[in-house]
Image (cartoon, grey):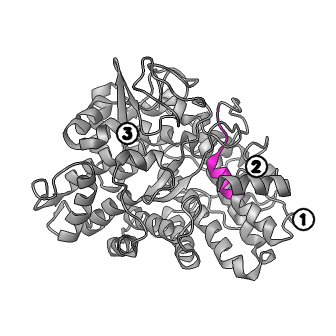
Amino acid sequence: MKNLKLLILVVFGVTFFACDTDEFLSPLPDTAVVADAFFKSDADVLAGIIGIYDAAQGVNENTTTSITNSNRGVQFEYLLTEHRTDNTRGATTEGSKADFHRYLVDPNNVQSEDYYQSMYDIIFRANNILQFIDVADESNQASYSAEAKFMRAYAYFNLVRLYGGVPLVTTVVGPEDNEPLFTRVATTEIYAQIGVDLLEAISGLDNTHRSRASQAAAQGLLAKVYLTQDSPNYTGAAQLCEAIINGGQFALQADFNDVFYNELNSEILFAIQYQAGNTLESQSFSSEFTSAFRQGREDGLNILNTNLIDDFTTYGGNRSGVSYVTFGTSNEVAKFLPVGSDITTSPPSYGPNARDAGNDWIVLRYADVLLMHAEAILAGGTETTNAAAINSYMAVRERAGFDAVADRPAILTKDALLIERRVELAFENHRLFDLVRLDVADAVLGAHALEMGYGSYDSRKLLLPIPAREINLSKGLLTQNPGY
């Protein structure tokens, strides 16, 4: 997709859709979508489709350092997720990025604001495509619509889990349409729309792509939606996971390292692509995960907490050495080391493009599907003896080096599943949502905050504040979350 995207942007000059634009779409009246004259052909619509993924990719922080009007896409997501769990923290307590791991995020936090707007950028670009879908060739309209709706669902799923009820905008809006732009709706309504969009995506897509929407990616995302929504649909989630498992088109990589460095491999259902050394197509988070031999602009982010290392020691198996590295007293993420890194040298080498890294961001992979399958069969309970659930759980553990017979449990517990998800998916931004979904967030994060001396945690902090800028622009129509 990297080459396709570059070609489209060159041929059609779609600067309106490029991530490096000075003005990116946000849910604001002064940036409402007006594109009547743009879409004139199937190629134009395809360019717009690629533009949706470009919005998710975001702008490298080392390319455009100013946070103002700089859509970072998913590149700040680890701050809003991993840093608000017991997994990781920043190396210092300075700056707005350090507020996440200390539960001090306020409505003026610039990283939260950027993420909120980035997700609406995805949504508005998707809505724009859907308005002009008839311009596309008739043979492509169903798949283009399905892609746009998959990405819209993906963005809304992120928003509803992080901010709660948010404005639900499913059409192109004009500069005076304040009500749809700024009226929060119930989470049940948002989940219903996500479900509708993903069901269309499932019916309209195949499994051609791994860096664009696919049928399996839509099935996997919908399974997670079913597990997360206010009234979980465990049966539906299990069936969706089984459709992926039985489809035979995805498999665990034999070597855990290859999941992250053999990009778009058999385990990847959906990943957001980056290109090393290309300032407009690269990412910066790989460099920011370094600390002892700092490659990024920060002192170090996503630094491991001690209790996660303890879990890796006991349950990590061969994943531990791939997942993190220790330099002196600094325990750092190793899953996304900039391509070309060699950390066995002294000092370690981080390749030629540490700040313009090309490591893809993995949104959904097969190991996650297997563990969701076990969770769906668990169905909100604390344990199960179901063989299918244990088989899925053990498939992931066996790849990590555990014995298929000696290490197979007779009973799979919720606690064991949660630990397995922690060590398998560490630093992939799942931990916060896992804790909430499995109803242990307050207990785990409350104990973690007490241990670390973060006195500001309470259950209301599970939701982030609605950005103050959005509330101000709404002239009071957009309301704030409790506790802020």
Which badge, 1 or 3, is on the more N-terminal residue?
1
Which badge, 2 or 1, is on the more N-terminal residue?
2
The quadrant the N terminus occupies is bottom right
Q: Type of residue at label 3?
A: Thr
Q: In which quarter of the image is residue 143?
A: bottom right
Q: Type of residue at label 1?
A: Ala
Where is residue 384? Give x, y as percent.
16, 65
As helix, strand or loop, the secondary structure at mark 2 comes to loop
Eye-nearest disc, 2 or 1: 2
Residue, disc 2 = 18
As helix, strand or loop, the secondary structure at mark 1 comes to loop
Q: Residue at x 40, y 75 (%)?
A: 247
The span from disc 1 to disc 3 (Cα, nearest Å) is 46 Å
On whether residue 282 falls in the magenta region, the answer is: no
Front residue of 365/21: it is 365
Which badge, 2 or 3, is on the more N-terminal residue?
2
Q: Which residue is drawn at 65% across and 66% down?
A: 148
Q: Quadrant of residue 283?
A: top right
Q: Is residue 15 above or below residue 445?
A: below
The span from disc 2 to disc 3 (Cα, nearest Å) is 33 Å
The span from disc 2 to disc 1 (Cα, nearest Å) is 17 Å
Specify the label residue 37 is tagged with. 1
Q: In this view, does 212 lie above or below 399?
A: below
Residue 191 can be seen in this image: yes
Front residue of 52/205: it is 205
Residue, disc 3 = 85
Q: Quadrant of residue 75?
A: top right
* The furthest residue to the bottom: 138
Where is residue 407? Give x, y as percent.
13, 53
